[in-house]
Amino acid sequence: MPVAVITDSTACLPEQMAAQWGISVVQVQIVTDDRIDDEARFDRAELIEMLRSGRPVSTRPPDPGAFFWTFADAVSAGATAIVSLHISERMSATAEAAREAAQQIRVPVYVIDSGTTGMSLGFAALSAARAAAAGADPQRVIEAAHRRYRFASEFVYVDTLEYLRRGGRIGKASAFLGTAFSVKPLLTVAEGEVAPLTRVAGGKRALAKLADLAVRRAGSAPVDVAIACATPSDRELGMVQQLRSRVPELREIVLVRASTVIAAHVGPGALGITVSPAA
């Protein structure tokens, strides 16, 4: 494709889906007490156990060199322009690293701060790649992505705010700190950062409310939906079935594994729902 589409691993794109549309994914890094590496090179189960046991797990953006080689590979494959879509700059310096690398590339590189993360970013990258595959120029590829991430919504259930507080990503959701353990926070992403939605007593009620919010947001418009979690279980499969029956104009629904970088900040028990306008 003349326009290559790049994103980062917080987009939560399944490998097969990214490969199908030729999307290159640059890995955000995870830092443990004895290792720094791309998140894909860590054993997911081991990292989840580290989080549950309270061992230190933090994250950092990709090295600019990782972007440089990804961009260079795209040029070698025939790209005459690159659109690089990334997690909100209020959450990560990933886009900044991409811009630094872009200065060394001989074709135009358009680095886009999506203002979001998760499958809101993932769906945007997919739309961008589809536009690129159809022969769109860089501006139209960017517009295709913009339509998706601008109007997408993230709804997130967390067992506790402790992971967000510990990782410095709590944003306006700090208003919910001090909530009783049995009261579960529901969060969103607004203006590029984590923001509070509401609090619900009990995990089952909170998850039911999360589904209600997603259904209300979908309304009667054509939408795609993604459900993301660190480790899929019957809970997530039940949510898929429920939304499939309750969202009237559902075009696509996917169950994805959340990036372990995201899991490190929201906690292993979190569950996210993305509602995105269908392309």
Image (cartoon, helix red, strand yellow):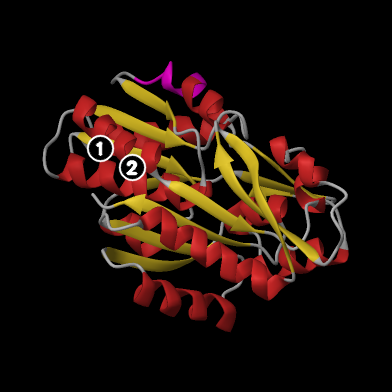
Could one spot residue 14 in this view of the protein? no
Q: Are marks 2 and 1 in contact (CB under 8 Å)?
A: yes
Find residue 202 and report its image quarter: bottom right
Numbered disc total: 2
- Where is residue 194 shown, x and y percent of the image? 64, 41
On residue 144, the disc is 1
Q: Kindly tell me whether residue 179 is visible in this rendering.
A: yes
Q: CA distance from mark 2 to mark 1?
A: 7 Å
Number of residues whose C-alpha sits closer than 10 Å to that of mark 2, classed few (under 14), some (14–19) or many (20 or more): many
* Residue 123 on image: x %, y %: 36, 50
Task: Please determine whether, in this image, residue 87 is positioned above or below residue 249.
Answer: above
278 left or right of 239?
Answer: left
Question: Badge 2 is on which residue?
Answer: 148
* SS class, disc 2: helix
Instruction: Say left or right for 80 vs 185.
Output: left
Magenta segment, which residues?
A: 100-105
SS at mark 1 in the image: helix
Q: Measuring 64% from the left and 41% from the top, which residue is drawn there?
A: 195
Q: Is residue 251 above or below residue 188?
A: below
Which of the two residues, 30 or 272, is positioned nearer the viewer here? 272
User: Residue 169: x percent and y percent?
Assistant: 71, 39
Q: Residue furthest top?
A: 103
Pick whichever, 174 or 260, lies toward us: 174
Amino acid bearing label 1: Ala
The disc placed on residue 115 is none
Q: Give the class, few, some or many, for how many residues have Cα within 10 Å of label 1's Cα (few <14, many ≥20).
A: many
x, y (%) of residue 79? Answer: 23, 33
Tell me if 99 is positioned left or right of 105 in this view.
right
Please name the amino acid that badge 2 sits on: Arg
Q: Is residue 101 magenta-colored? A: yes
